[in-house]
Amino acid sequence: MAGCENPFLALKARQVVVMFFMITAGLALVFSTLGALELLPLQGDDPILAPILYSLIFFGLCVAILLAARRLPLRLTVLLGPVPRHLAWVQLLWLVVGVFLFSLGAFQVSYLGLSLVAPGLVETTLSQSLLLSPDQATAPGLYNTLMLFSVLVVAPITEEFIFRGVLLHRWGVKWGVRPAIVLTSVLFGVLHSNLIGLFVFGVVMSLLYLSTRSLLVPMVAHAINNAIASGVDFLATQPTANAIDTLAEFRASWWLGVLCLLVSAPWVLRYVAYHWPERQAPLPYFLNQGCNQGDRLA
């Protein structure tokens, strides 16, 4: 069929990896040079650099991918797909809540096992917080604003574009849609240090994209998930909260993780089973072009 381009035959996953490391190394060089010249109004260990660098790296990576794919061409509007007009938003919200509880339970259970072999790593993880208080940062208001922007805006847009938009299509063209879902979700889980929980999160985001043909849906779902996580983190840092700060408290609260898994697993896994694609299911980019299975392989 005329007009059915397949940019993912030429766009390689290793190109994305190389661009990521080049952007990261370039920004590190720029910031270290500015720091050495005393032109950077921040210390090298200032927490505020974390959300700034994250946003610059991932937005930069998305821009680099689009620039590299101009000659293919990769059409962003086709990748994003249509704006959903009849989406069941209440059901989507409940699905996101279920996925969040599953990832939270998976984190609790998996890190409970990890605490037996690497207690220091788990203690360090428990001491970390998304939002900082005045005694933890020189400008907590600015830091928290930038962190929330990176978590609620940058991460949902850029990570969904990279994982569900680019990598899902690239590996789907190469190996098929099912292996692509698994591979992108495993990579997503590994990079977020919660293999089981974020693997399932990645699978659900992939299925949302496949079933709606709109990348905007997993972007919104991702943002809602991160908003819930930010709210939980904020409540846990309040003076009146019974926060789990020590390794002993974390181990004693094992039942919370099990409870989260028992409550969330039935409806999350039911969604996955119901929406799991056929082996030869077409990918959203090609459906949005109006191409059939044969056209996309041309």
Image: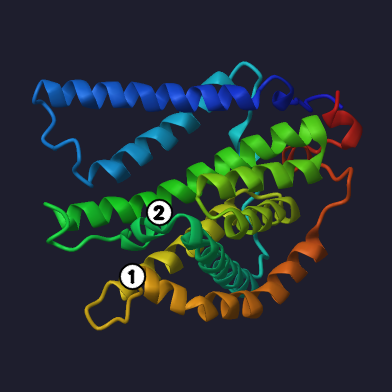
Q: For this view, does 72 lie left or right of residue 67?
A: right
Q: For this view, does 226 lie left or right of residue 44?
A: right
Residue 233 location (% of width, % of height): 36, 68
Could you tell me which secondary element the residue under label 1 belongs to? Answer: loop
Which amino acid lies under the numbered mark 1 shown in the image of this protein? Thr
Quadrant containing the N terminus in the rendered view = top right
Residue 157 location (% of width, % of height): 49, 46
Quadrant containing the C terminus in the rendered view = top right
Give the image quarter of residue 163.
top right
Q: For this view, does 278 lie left or right of residue 64?
A: right
Residue drawn at x 47%, y 30% is: 61
Furthest-left residue in view? 38
Which amino acid lies under the numbered mark 2 shown in the image of this protein? Leu
Above or below residue 108? Residue 281 is above
Q: Which label was assigned to residue 32? A: none
Q: Earlier in the sequence, mark 1 or mark 2?
A: 2
Residue drawn at x 72%, y 38% is: 285
The residue where tag 1 is placed is: 246
Spatial separation of the CA atoms under disc 1 and disc 2? 12 Å
Q: Which label was assigned to residue 121? A: 2
Q: Pointer 1: residues within 10 angstroms few (<14), some, or many (20+)? A: some
Could you tell me which secondary element the residue under label 2 belongs to? Answer: helix
